[in-house]
Amino acid sequence: MDVTLSEVGLKYPGADRNAVDNFDLRIADGEFLVLVGPSGCGKSTTLRMLAGLELPTEGTILFGDEDVTTTPAAERDIAMVFQNYALYPHMTVESNMEFALKNTRVPKAERKRRILEAAELLDIDQYLSRKPRQLSGGQRQRVAMGRAIVRDPQVFLMDEPLSNLDAKLRVQTRTQISQLQRRLGVTTVYVTHDQTEAMTMGDRVVVMNEGRIEQIGTPKELYNRPETLFVASFIGSPTMNLLPGRVETDAAGAKRVRVGRNVLPVPTGLRFEHEHVVVGVRPEDLVLADSNALEDAEREDQFTIHISLVESVGSDVYVSGTAGGADEESRVVARIDKDLEPTAGEKLTLAADARRVLFFDAETEQLIGSGA
């Protein structure tokens, strides 16, 4: 089922601003859409409006062609999976999964069929007679998923369902959820504050900030071409290097950007509205200046950093420092080969492929363009 939100907003009584403002989005039938952003950005509030637990103060919500803006939650064909599982502790797994079906008077034989089918799908059929306290966190989450599946809804809504799991189980369970959603083909809206979850699970990702949509796109689009400084700083781990710069004109009349003591060339045709800009480059797009990783030496942009921290994560080594002796605002993180062992206090000269450098307007915080 398609889901459409048109200029949806919600302002709580006594609040200075909207919790969600001018939210405009169409979710395709069968799509796995992720809402991501920091705490308090409005993502869970948006999900609650889709569920009917909160009523918008402006805008409309459509399920298919039906306007459900003011439709009570019980009359919407949705199933919600919560962060805290919300299982009845005194009931067995089977009873928990059966509860909603009983309330809607689904025949007993049909209830049994749906429960067994969902339990086998989630590999919890051996736990149907157990109580929630006898299950692990991951098993409880699968029971919560099963309870949603048996309802055979038109839309799944998931509110940070993995946040209570440990790191290893979180990776395993998010893979199961992704595979399950693709197998069922049900339109799914998934809320998380974890950008890794968002990037690995979503067909499309909506990045939210202060109740508004910052950017909508595929994970690859968000990573390679963030449209705002907020998205650039939020998506990616480690985050994109964002260096304050100033636009200059050389003796030949060509534009260039100065970052500390370093000067970056600017492609012809890139237009700057203001003098101050922010230069963005991913840690993995910086290599040692004497490396052969960049084929075209004329496209290399060099940063000399003073190393203050070296972090090894096994497969890679991350070095942190300040660019060209500049202040703390010009901190740079680079990913280098795991076999290299630089130490704090050393200097390191790095090269960035100009095709991977992004320029943002420091005043509007909007993307100006890339170095390509």
Image (cartoon, rainbow, N blue to C red):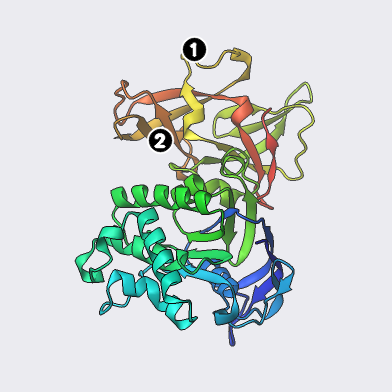
- Separation of residues labelled 1 and 2 (CA atoms): 23 Å
Front-lying residue, 358 or 176: 176
Q: Mark 1 = which residue?
A: 292
Residue 195 can be seen, yes or no: no
- The quarter of the picture where the C terminus appears is top right
Looking at the image, residue 48 sits to the left or right of residue 92; the answer is right
What label does residue 326 carry, if any?
A: none
> Percent from the top left, x then y, of residue 135?
23, 64
The answer to whether residue 261 is above or below residue 120 is above
Front-lying residue, 338 or 31: 31
Please report the residue visible at 60 percent of the width from the left and 30 percent of the height from the top: 356
The answer to whether residue 302 is above or below residue 10 is above
Front-lying residue, 71 or 192: 71
> Percent from the top left, x then y, of residue 248?
70, 33
Please report the residue visible at 40 percent of the width from the left and 35 percent of the height from the top: 321
- The quarter of the picture where the N terminus appears is bottom right
Q: Earlier in the sequence, mark 1 or mark 2?
A: 1
Q: Residues within 10 Å of mark 2 (few under 14, many from 20)?
A: many
> Percent from the top left, x then y, of residue 145?
41, 63
Indicate the secondary structure of the residue bearing disc 1.
Answer: loop
Q: Mark 2 = which residue?
A: 321
> Percent from the top left, x then y, of residue 37?
52, 58
Please report the residue visible at 40 percent of the width from the left and 31 percent of the height from the top: 306
- Which of the 4 image quarters holds residue 86? bottom left
The answer to whether residue 253 is above or below residue 226 is above
Q: Amino acid at mark 2?
A: Gly
- Which of the 4 image quarters holds residue 13? bottom right
Q: Amino acid at mark 1?
A: Asn
Indicate the secondary structure of the residue bearing disc 2.
Answer: strand
